[in-house]
Image (cartoon, helix red, strand yellow):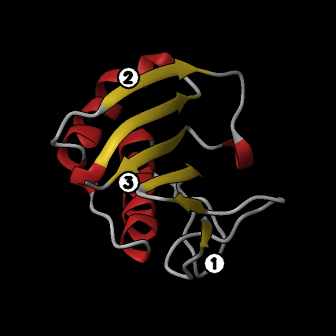
Amino acid sequence: MKEIILTESAPAPIGPYSQAILCGNILYCSGQIPVEPLTGEVIQGGIEKQTEKCCINIGEVLKQADFEYEDVIKTTCFLADMNDFAAFNGVYAKYFTSKPARSCVAVKQLPKNCLVEIEVIAARD
């Protein structure tokens, strides 16, 4: 059985998708961009501040489903500029201390012209 996960503490979906889907003991989270949930505005201030906001938004979705960062087993990270990789990594490492499997790619453009988007998959025993 699958359950749609939705929290007002993370940005509302801007399209026909869910923030996350819980299927059994696996949580599939849609990509989070650095948007302030209350205003819908993109956080300014460069890659580090945007990465921080993405991670905070992911944490809110995880919490809504009773998961934690330590439960994350896979991340997919999208950067608008691979020159931001080192700065991105510095912030990312503070949240994903369990070192989940990861892919990180540069893309031509992200929604709302963000610098970063992160999606995760989490699992419980």
Give the residue displayed 61% in from the left and 64% down from the top.
1
User: Looking at the image, is mark 3 or mark 2 nearer the viewer?
Assistant: 3
Amino acid at dot 2 = Phe
Residue 100 image-quadrant placement: top left
Look at the picture and state if 49 lies above or below 57: above
Look at the picture and state if 92 lies above or below 36: above
Estimate the x, y position of residue 71 in percent, counting from the top left: 27, 52
Write down the residue under mark 3: 55
Write down the residue under mark 1: 39
Which class describes the residues within 10 Å of circle 2: few (<14), some (14-19), or many (20+)?
some
Estimate the x, y position of residue 49 in percent, counting from the top left: 38, 51
Of the residues under marks 2 and 1, which one precedes in the sequence? 1
As helix, strand or loop, the secondary structure at mark 3 comes to helix
Give the residue displayed 29% in from the left and 30% down from the top.
89
Write down the residue under mark 2: 85
Amino acid at dot 1 = Thr
